[in-house]
Image (cartoon, rainbow, N blue to C red):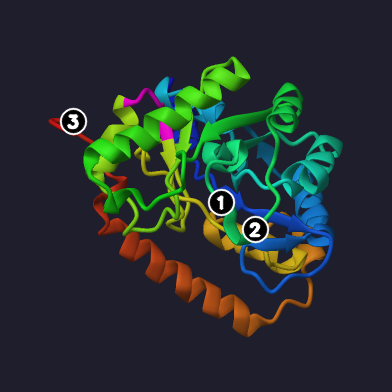
Amino acid sequence: METSLNKQSYFLQVKFPILVYHQISQENNPDYSTVAKKMFVSQMRYISRHYHPIQLSKLLEIMARSQPILPRTIVITFDDGYADTFSEAFPILQYYKIPATLFITTGFIDGHTPAPYGAKMLSWNKIKEMQRSGIECGAHTVTHPNLHRLSLKKAMREISQSKNRLEEKLQSPIKTFAYPYGHSRSFSKSTQMLVQKAGYVGACTTLPGWNDSYANPYGLRRISLAKSQIRYFALQFSELLNGKLLPNEAAQIQGVNKKVVRLWKTRYQRLAKRLKRDDFFSPITRLSHY
């Protein structure tokens, strides 16, 4: 009995990362949110060999039921709805059989809201095709505003109307949400309550760090390792999860600069302390008004 309880406790304490991507490019791009396709391939290959990818809604269901989370569980997410998610990322995800969650800004797809930097966005048909092949869709508002700067009524409209539009077009429940921008000045406890009231089971920020079974589902942290070469990608994963590399992984990253390793350790230790002081990740209470 004691062994069973210890095993259950071990699973409940598992940390898991949620990765965030935006655009995938054929070439190297100086923009921080764009990753070269070649690099994306190496990252997905690494994940397929060493991790257990899962859709965000399925992971949230496991958390809600207090079921054990497998060690090395990971979630892959894409924000906004760029066309290259279909043309560049989707074939790679299919090849490595990696499920992912795509957060859609519906105004970009409908053409009612100008796309960032004039970028080409997905069509509804492309989104439906990805959905049929294991890519889950979540909402990312209608016009991609900073929700914290809106009145609660306007914020609720953005949150709920994007969900309604996605459910209308895709004919399936939309369970997850991502805050536009996602930093600490783009949402609040009140925003989290609105997301819960709108019927979502969880929401992602872009505040960096890992999550565990006890994380507030409406304040999930995400990390961006998009620009990392594979040896640093592997090492950062190890540091983020506060774990040790397996022997076969260690062999893949030989030659990593030891000074860089020490800097990462210091950085993540400081980050962990700062995030503990942040109440975005504590459970939310009932919504009193909006």
Mark 2, residues whose alpha carbon is within 10 Å: few (<14), some, or many (≥20)? few
Q: Which residue in the protein does label 2 denote?
A: 118
Q: Can the viewer see residue 116 in this picture?
A: yes
Q: Which one is in front in this view, the residue at disc 3 or the one at disc 2?
A: 2
Q: Which mark is residue 259?
A: none
Residue 164 higher or lower than 70, as above or below:
above
Marks 2 and 1: in contact by CB < 8 Å?
Answer: yes
Please give left or right for residue 23 compared with residue 15 in the image. Answer: right
Residue 105, image x, y percentages: 53, 41
Dot 2 lies on which element? helix
Q: Earlier in the sequence, mark 3 or mark 1?
A: 1
Q: Position of residue 245 (x, y in %)?
A: 67, 58
The mark found on residue 287 in the picture is: 3
Q: Nearer the viewer, residue 44 or 262?
A: 44
- For the point 55% across and 48% down, which residue is it? 17
Query: In the image, is 187 to the left or to the right of 145?
Result: left
Q: Which residues are magenta?
A: 198-202
SS under mark 1: loop
**Drawn side of residue 123 relative to residue 162, left or right:** right
User: Where residue 83 appears, x then y in whole percent?
Assistant: 73, 46
Left or right: residue 130 compared with residue 76: right
**Marked residue nearer the N-terminal end (3 or 2):** 2
Q: Main secondary structure of the magenta part?
A: loop
Check if mark 3's residue and mark 1's residue have beta carbons within 8 Å: no
Q: Which mark is residue 114?
A: 1
- Measured in 3D between alpha carbons, the distance from the residue under mark 1 to the one under mark 2, in whole angstroms, is 7 Å
Residue furthest front in the image: 112
Which quadrant of the view contains residue 220? top left
Asked which quadrant contains residue 236, the reply is bottom right
Q: Amino acid at mark 1?
A: Pro
